[in-house]
Amino acid sequence: MANVLSDDKRQQVLTLGRLGWSLRQIEEATGVRRETAGPYLRAAGIAVRRPGGKTAAWPPKPATGEGVLTDSSAAKPATADEVSTDSSSRNSTDSDSKPATTDGVSTDPRAAASPVASACEPFRDVILDALARGRNARAIWQDLVDDHGFTARYPSVQRFVRRVRGSQVREAQPVITTEPGQEAQVDYGEGPMVRDRESGKYRRTRLFVLTLGYSRKSVRLIVPRSGTRIWAELHERAFRRLGGAPRVVVLDNLREGVATPDIYDPTLNPLYRDVLAHYGVVALPCRVGDPDRKGKVESGVGHAQRTPLRGLRFESLDEAQTYLDRWEAHWADTRIHGTTKRQVAAMFAEERPALLALPVEPFRYYQYGERTVHLDGCVEVDAAYYGTPPGWIGRRVQVQWDGVRVRLLDPRTGQLLREHVRQERGRHRIHPDDVPPRTPATTEQLLRRARVAGRHIGALCDQIHRTDGEIGVKRILGVLSLARKHGAPTVDAAAQAALDLGAPTYRFLRNYLDRRPAAPLTLRQVDPLIRQLTLYRDVINRKTGETT
């Protein structure tokens, strides 16, 4: 014994040892390290309880002249008579209790036996390397079992790791109990480093975790980046993996799920809200700064980050997801949960029938945004134009679109205003009920300005309005702009030519003015105009047919 204890400390250690306390408990109660308390207990012949409830009694340490202790009472080994609490008996000496010695060397074979080496000793280098990469004891034990044929149990690795870096004290966490199938908690965390295909560099990924409140069954998915649609798709993938959906999803106020955080009335992103409604799930955002409300998924994220993914890098997302799925099935689902004291897979088998049934068809994803209604009563989506009901000019509407449909919604109530079929770029789509029964006053004013500019200009603009309706308002403005640029007489003559040739369009008038000759037209110059006239006539006929 290299350290010498005072009489009080020594009596405390011996008393607690006689009561059956382990070395770890004695260290926590008295502050005397196990390496110091152990030799005193061995010298007194007191049985010491090892971890796991087993006890081991060492023989009394033989008294030799080379002892390090200077205390006279501690220099003599204790005998069986020292169990008495009489202070006089503790100082007595019993020569029968000493083992046989030869020149001060014990002949007891148990005294010469060396302590059993740890089963982790052959894997010391592997364990130290894993600790340097930040992996915890359970992850190291799982890797040793999977990759090195390790046969010992987890406490062996745990004790070995504690001797290397010491034990950690955990804080108490509140426990929220829920009924089977009632609640799930979702959250994002930092995923592993995965090599990017384009750049060839390792990049940090995102780890999505959904944890059921009753069974603690988790679904963990790795994605390269985050987004509103990705966030919604991850929920759908998690529901498919579980074979059902919970009734409530608890999340924090990240922007992928919550557009406007509020304590009493938060606003969800429309796409995320519709995906959950498709599966019959209700979102319940946490209060800002209250992570304990979803502590189960927080623990699930930390469990994955500390145990299977810490210190690892993968060459592809598929490789990372495969490794995580194998760990989930082999270790996470088969573990005994620390709070419920039951196996996660067994509790999930009880909870699965209580989950909501999944719909037959998956959710049809769409893009969404807000648009301002133009003066022609239309909104623009991907360079195509779609009409709104009367009275919405200058106001903003919500728009949802996919490859087939475009939906216009009231931003306050979410009510469907109009639904249109997708159009090509530059095309318009107006519902027949939205066509005004009479010409608006502003359009009448433009037509009067056109008639004042010139007789043929007015006739051309009237023809544009009859053919294109309200969509032709911009083209009428273009004709008036040409009159200011080239002069009213020149444009009036060009408008007369357009009417004579049967092409009363703004584009034909603009091209005609750009190519007008200084001298009378020759036959070679007239041929391109005739071909252009035929082309515009086909376009007009096609537009007229679509409008009707």
Image (spheres, helix red, strand yellow):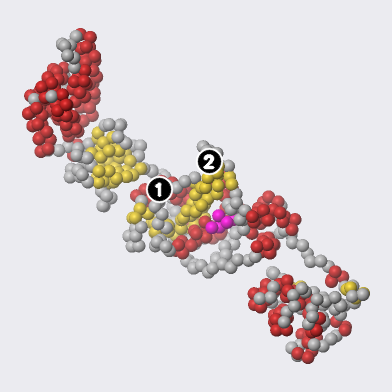
SS under mark 1: helix
- Crowd band around label 2 with a 10 angstrom C-alpha radius: few (<14), some (14–19), many (20+): some
* Residue 436 screen position, x and y as percent: 15, 38
Per the rendered image, the range of residues in magenta is 302-307
Disc ID at residue 228: 1
Q: Give whichever of 523, 531 is nearer the camera.
A: 523
Residue name at image x 74 percent, y 58 percent: 121
Kind of residue at disc 2: Asp
- Decide if residue 326 is in sight here: no
Residue name at image x 16 percent, y 17 percent: 501
* Residue 202 screen position, x and y as percent: 55, 44
SS under mark 2: loop
Circle 2 residue? 196
* Left or right relative to 216: residue 417: left
Residue name at image x 35 percent, y 43 percent: 367
Q: In this view, does 347 lie above or below 232?
A: below
Q: Does the magenta stretch include residue 493?
A: no
Q: Is residue 57 above or below residue 386?
A: below
Q: Give whichever of 190, 420 is nearer the camera.
A: 190
Q: In this view, does 208 lie above or below 390?
A: below
- Decide if residue 85 is in sight here: yes
Residue name at image x 84 percent, y 86 percent: 93
CA gap, disc 2 and disc 1: 22 Å
